[in-house]
Amino acid sequence: MLIAIISLAVVSVGSAVAFIIYEKNKKKQIGLPKKKISNKNFNKFYQKFYLLSSRFRLTNNILLRVRKKVETLAVYDEYSLRRQVAQTMVTIISVILVIILALMVIRPGWLISFWIMVGLVFATDLMIDFFIVRIEKKLLPQIKEFLKRLRYFYAQTHMIDEASFESINYTGSEMKVQAQRIHNTLTSVNPEEEQLKYEEVAPNRFLKVISGLMVLVKEKGDVIDPENERGSAFTRGIAAITKELNLEIMYRSKLAYRLRFLAPLTLIPIIFALPIQSAIVYLFPIMSRFYESRIGFLGAIFIYAFSIGMYFVIRKIKDVSDVSYQTKLNKIQWEKRLYEKFKIVRLIVKIFSPNYKTVSYAKKSQLIKDANEPLEVEWLTLRQLVLSVITLIILVSGMLYAHKSESQSALYNIIPSSMMTSNVSDEEYEEFKKTTDFDREMIMKLQSASEFTADGIMQTIANQMGIDEVENPKVKQAYDRIMEKYTIVENAYFKWWELLIILLIVFGIWYIPEILLQLQKNLRRKDMENEVHQFLTIISILREFNSIGVLTLLVWLERFSVTFKEPLQKCILNFDSGPEEALEELSNDISFEAFQQIVERLKLSISRLSVKEAFEDIELEREFYLEQREEYNTRSISNRGDFAYLASVSPVATLLILHVLVPIIYISTTHLQSMMTGF
C-alpha cells in the first residue's frame, strides 16, 4: 500500500511537470499569447531559488550535479541555465516532500521509513550517475572525433568557421550541441563576447580551450612557421589538446573498468542484514536475545552506517569530473553567524581555540589557507565543538536506548536461553509465556523489596510454584533463571566505562574537520598540478601569436583557471598600477612551485624578453608534465582500485562478523553456561 501511494505521488508530480512543459511548447507552436507577468515572476523565483540553494552545502552539491547534466545536454546562457537547473531542483524537492508527507500520513514505522529514505537516496544517486557520467563518457571521445575532423577540414580550407561548420555533421549527438554553439560563436557579430558567455556554461575544460583557440584564430589569424617546418600554430594547438584528451579518456576508461561492480557490493549488508537475521532467528530462536540486546543494537547501527559510508566513499573514488569554480562569497557560514551573534559561544570557543600568535594557531591558519576553505580558526573550532556535541548526544542517547532495550528483553522475551533450535509449538509457547510472566513478577518484587536473601527468594519461589520443598530442582532452576534476568535488569544502567569509551570516540570525532581539511589540501594540490599543466598547454599555443602580451596571457589563464582564479583576478586588477608588483604579489599569494616558475617567466617578459622568448622551452616542460601525469594516472588507478576493493568488501565482512559470527559465539557461550549450571 505504501509503495503504491509513493509511486502514485512520484508519477503524479512527474506527470504534472510533463504537462506543464507540453503546454508551454504547445503555446509556442500555435502562437498563443503568453502571460508575461507570470513568466517574469517565475523567472525571478527560479533565480532566487538558485542563489538560495547555492548557499547551503547539501543543496549546493545537488545543484552542481544537476547543472552538470543540464549544461551537457543543451547549451544555454547563464541566466537560462540557472532557470532550467532551478526548475529541475524544484521538481526533485517536490517529489521528496511528497514522499515525506506520505510517510507522515501513513506512519509505517521507523524501519520502513528508513528503508524508503535510503532507497530514495541511492535511486537519486544512481539516476544522476546514469545521466551525468554516461554523457561525460560519451562526450570526450566525441570531442576527439570533432578535433580530428576540424583539423582535416582546416587543412583543406584554412578557414576556421568553414572547418567548424563541416565538422558538425561528423560528431555525435552530445558533441553536436556544443559544436553548434561554438560555430554560432565564431559567426556572431562579437565572437569574443559570445565566447565569454559560452565559457560560463561549457561542460569541461577541453571545450573551453578549443572554443577559445578557434575564436583567437578567427580574430587574430593563424601563425605559420615555415622556417622550422612546424606548420600552423592552430594545428599544433589542436595536437596538444588531443594528447591531453587522450590521457584523460584512457584514465577514465581504465578507472571505470577497475571499479566496476564495486559500489553495489557495499549495499549487500543493507539488503541482506534483516533477511539473515530473520533466518537465523527462525533456525535458532535464542538468537533473538542477542539481536535485541545492547550489543546487537549497536552492531546493527554500525553495519548500516558503515555500509552507507563505504558506498559514498567508492562513489567519491569514482568521481573524476572536472573541478568547477564556485564563488564562496555568498555561502551561508553558520559558524560565523553563531560565533558573532552569541557571546556565550565566543567564550566557549575561546576556551578550546588556540591562542593567537601561537604555533598551533599558525598551523591551523595555514591549513585553512592551503585547503582554500572560507574559515577562520575560531570558526573551525566551533565546527569541531558542534560536531563533538552532536556525536556525544547521539552516542549517549543510543546507549541509554540500548540499556532500556536490554532490560525490556530480559523482562518480556518469551523464548528461553536453553531453546537453541527449531520453532516452538503453541503449547510450548504458552508455557514459556507463563514462565516469563512469573519471572517478571518475581523481579518486580525483588526491585521493590528493601532487602532480601537467597533463602528467602527460594522460599517465595517455592510458595508461588506450590512446592513444599525448597531444595526441589525446579525451585533451584527457577531461582537461577530469575536471578540471571534480575542481574541483567539491575545492570542496565549507564556505566562510567561506557562514558569513557564515548568520550574517546568524541575525542576522535573532534579531529575529523581538520582531517577533512588536510584531505582537501591534498586534493587541491593535485588540482593545482593539473591546472599548471593546462596553463602550459595554453601558453604553448598563445606564445606563437605576436600580439599576445603578458596582460593578455594573464587574462587567458584566468578564464580557464579554477584553483588559481581569485589570485589571478587580483593580479589583473592591480596590473595597471605596476606589472612587476602585481606579479610579485601573485607569486606571494600562491606558494605552488610549478606555478611560481610560470610567474617568473612572466616577469622576464615584462622587462627583458618577449613572451615567445621567455617560454621558448615550454614544449620540453609540457612533455615532462605529460609523462609525469601518465605515471600519476597509472599509480592513481592502482591505488584507487585497491582502496575501493577494500571499501567494497569490508561491509560484507563486517556483516558476517557482527551479524553472524559474534551472535553464534555469544549464544554458544550462554548455552554452555546454562548446561554447566544444569550439571
Image (cartoon, rainbow, N blue to C red):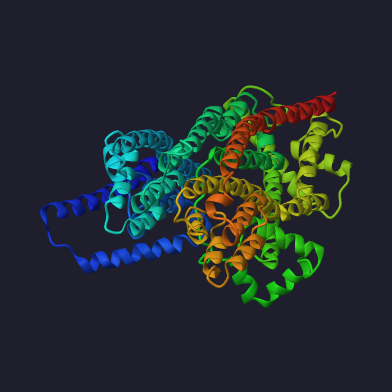
> Residue 238: which quarter of the image?
top left
The residue lying toward the viewer, choosing from 163 and 617, is 617
Number of numbered discs overlaid on the protein picture? 0
Q: Residue at x 82, y 50 (%)?
A: 497
Left or right: residue 109 compared with residue 627: left
> Dividing the image into 4 quarters, which one contains the N terminus?
top left
Q: In this orientation, does residue 200 appear?
A: yes
Rendered location of residue 61, percent (x, y):
49, 52
The residue lying toward the viewer, choosing from 442 and 521, is 521
Q: Is residue 45 above or below residue 440?
A: below
Rendered location of residue 115, percent (x, y):
50, 41
The furthest residue to the front: 227
> Residue 171: which quarter of the image?
top left
Left or right: residue 560 compared with residue 491: left
The residue lying toward the viewer, choosing from 571 and 472, is 571
Rendered location of residue 4, percent (x, y):
35, 41
The residue lying toward the viewer, choosing from 263 and 603, is 603
Q: In this orientation, does residue 98 appear?
A: no
Q: Is residue 308 above or below residue 257?
A: below
Left or right: residue 489 compared with residue 572: right
Q: Residue at x 55, y 70 (%)?
A: 574
> Dividing the image into 4 quarters, which one contains the C terminus?
top right
